[in-house]
Amino acid sequence: MIYERHQTAIHKDSQAKTPPHQRSSLPLSLPLAALPSPIANQIAGGPADIDMSPAPAVTSLDEMDDKHSVVIPSTDSASHRDAHDPESDHDSDLHSSNHTSSNNSHHNARTNINNTKLLLPDRHLTIEFENSLSIPTHNATAHTEDAIHSPRPLCDPKAGFAIGFAEDRNRRHRRTMEDAHAFISNFLDVQGQGYFAVFDGHAGKSAAEWCGQHLHETLEISLQKNTHKPTPEVLNECFVSTDKQLAERPGMHSGCTVAVALLRVEDTDPNDASIPDASSTLKANGGQHMGKRRVLYTANAGDARIVLCRNGVAERLSYDHKGSDVPEQVRISQSGGFVLNNRVNGVLAVTRSLGDCAMKEWVIGNPYTAETPICETDDFFIVACDGLWDVCTDQTAVDLVANIQDPQKASEQLLAYALEQWSTDNLSVMVVRLDPNWKYDGNTCAKAIVTTSGSSSRD
């Protein structure tokens, strides 16, 4: 069984020590002969796999998902000197590192790209270019008026937390919105429990939308059937099961990274002084006292991230599964694959995801999991896709919203910041503020309030 379980997660910007990720520049040409041999072997599956006929003109490159476009080394050292940086995991020349502020200057450029149409057989993705495609530089002013803000999430006032959510297609760089999300107040009809998830789609939005609507259902069934199994194990099984369900769906060729935070109310031993009890209360139960505590279980596959604010300090509760990660490179190599330019088989920038059926031999769905008891110094946590984290460190995100009590305004603040910092991806940001004065009142019959992919409903 491949999954990681960690008691009390502590990734205090642990991955912030790695060199900054620089986005590589756009390719200059895409004839098959120009491809590095490993990629050429990956693509060339036979005469039917490559169509070199003239392609219709395109006016934008924003449909090229930066997790899946093939990277070609540039021959123009002047205008594309940053292309193919060893630490690069995305394909854009407009990028700020997620651990350092970007000082890159962007220049107007006109790139002559061969009139070529390329079909990647194992990704079912067509890339088209037209000769003399102009790539202008945009002003670095965030178009926040174009942001897609979901209505204020519905939440039980006795739940012990408040949710804020904001999303943006990022029209300067993306033609479509491929993210999805879900949050549930009173998860499993237990007051104080919550489910919070963000799904970052690539090569289409089908996988992300399907997971947003169904992953929590699989998790509910698994938790009810396995009441004595550790929650991290249940989360792992849930991810694997969802991955298999996606593989069985006809025409499902897209994939998505996932970050899930599950807030549970659990029994605890009141004599155990090592367990934080600031958010729990003692309830009379048959002459005995039963302690209650809140525990935050987190699971992620890919580079969507969860960050907890504990006493003003950012604590990362997730792990970035990227091609630049050495343990992931070793795992992929042992599975018969390879990592080229920090991409799995030269194609995919993330090493774990749900979906991506054609690459499932190397890109697995098993998540990184963590278990974190909630204490009185835990103020809020953030669940967001890499569109935010590409341009914002964990601590910066925490500092930006630490004094904003309204989680809806906090999520919008983070979204606006990402746009101002020239994020080039779709954006989905969820902020969950915890009530330090929450008390468990024994109500296990609360109605769950479910929101998936922007539509709210009451069960």
Image (cartoon, rainbow, N blue to C red):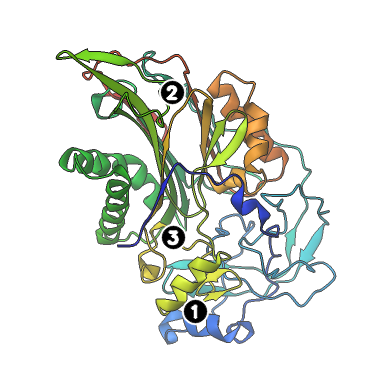
Q: Is residue 282 above or below residue 346?
A: above
Q: Is residue 281 above or below residue 122?
A: above
On residue 51, which mark appears? 1
Between circles 3 and 2, the one closer to the viewer is 3
* Foreground of the two, 59 or 439: 439
Residue appearing at x 27%, y 52% in the figure = 237
Q: Which mark is residue 153?
A: 2
x then y, percent, for residue 243: 31, 56
Looking at the image, do the residues carrying marks 3 and 2 touch, with CB atoms under 8 Å apart? no
**What residue sits right under mark 3 in the picture?**
352
Kindly identify the amino acid type of the residue bearing the numbered disc 2. Pro
Give how far across and how far down residue 58 sits, in percent: 61, 61
Residue 185 shows in the view: no
Q: Quadrant of residue 441?
A: top left
Q: Residue at x 41, y 82 (%)?
A: 48
Q: Is residue 294 left or right of residue 423?
A: left
Q: Residues within 10 Å of mark 1 (few under 14, many from 20)?
A: some
